[in-house]
Image (tube, rainbow, N blue to C red):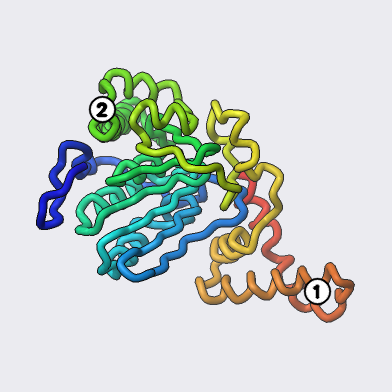
Amino acid sequence: MRRLNNGQRFFNGPAPIAMPDGLTQSTARPFFNRASGRVFDVQNAGDVTEIDLYDEIGFWGVSAKDFRQQLRNVTGGTIRLRINSPGGDVFDGIAMFNDLVAHKARVEVEVTGFAASAASLIAMAGDKITIADNAFFMIHNAWTLAVGDRNAISDVAAVLEQIDGALADTYAARTGMDRAEIVEMMDDETWLSAADARENGFADVVGKAEEAKAKFDLSCFAKVPDGLRGFTAQSAGPTIRDTERALRDAGHSRAQAKAMAARGNQADDQRDAGDDAENAEFWAELSAFSENLERSMTR
């Protein structure tokens, strides 16, 4: 992307994506059941706004609505967006990409762990894209769950084809790669190392390696490379965010769930120190929701 003297983007690369009609997003459950170190943090430092996007994309992580609200508060000339995300809801990803493209600030993207699926699309909004030496991009076709007869399923497939086409156009425009090659990469669920990302135009600069800022269960993907073992959380236990989500599934309000999850985290620390009796009341209260938590972590 280039800019005119007045700061307006001149698009010889990605353009805003029009979202097709006919397919509604699903918020029934998280895409990535186990995770640790989730963060969505926004800090203003002079003319630069730094955004850490270390979570899945969508209702269970960082929604397009939340992201847009933060962008509305950005008045400086530069947005520095650090990404470590397995992706998530494609509609939220498209909306977040479009909001970054439309913003007047210069967008600098730093991929610190991986930018997979919808997160890789968001990264394409960067005027400059840097990827850590041990980080990865991943692109693939959009997928969903659908119920219905052959006509209904055919309609859903047609919408998915439109989405994939729009994503392929965006990747091709930003990277300079041939669109047909991009389509083939998406069909194959392609993971690109930092060097491959730089060579193929997904990144402009390769930076130094960084430790994982967040870890996610990537078992829903078919071709996760061995180099990402340090960024995965297949064996992680429930986090405070997982507990909060399960409590909300059980019918509690956001405020109630946050309070109960925080109490549980504190009580767990104290219980590890041998203070079980003091926290018996909390554990009795929370036990009623343990089954729901287990379902939300394993389904």
* Lower position in the chain sequence, tag 1 or tag 2: 2
The answer to whether residue 24 of the structure is visible from this angle is: no
Instruction: From the viewer's perspective, tell me whether residue 46 is left or right of residue 88.
Output: left
Q: Nearer the viewer, residue 118 or 21?
A: 118
Residue positioned 30% across, 61% down in the render: 68
**Labels in figure, total:** 2
In x, y percent, where is residue 295? 64, 50
Tag on residue 176?
2
Q: Do the residues labelled 1 and 2 touch (CB within 8 Å)?
A: no
C-alpha gap between disc 1 and disc 2: 55 Å
- Residue 218: image quadrant is top right
User: In the structure shown, which secondary structural element does the residue marked by tag 1 occupy?
Assistant: helix
Instruction: From the viewer's perspective, tell me whether residue 16 is left or right of residue 73.
Output: left
- Residue 145: image quadrant is top left
Tag on residue 270?
1
| Placement of 286 over or under 32, stated as above or below | below
Q: Nearer the viewer, residue 61 or 21?
A: 61
In x, y percent, where is residue 155? 28, 31
Instruction: From the viewer's perspective, tell me whether residue 159 is left or right of residue 25.
Output: left
Tell us which disc is closer to us: 1 or 2: 2
| Placement of 111 over or under 159, stated as above or below | below
Tag on residue 178?
none
In x, y percent, where is residue 38? 55, 57
| Placement of 171 over or under 247, stated as above or below | above
Disc 1 residue type? Answer: Gln
Residue positioned 36% across, 26% down in the render: 200
Q: Which residue lies furthest to the bottom in this view?
A: 278
- Residue 209: image quadrant is top right
| Placement of 80 over or under 205, stated as above or below | below
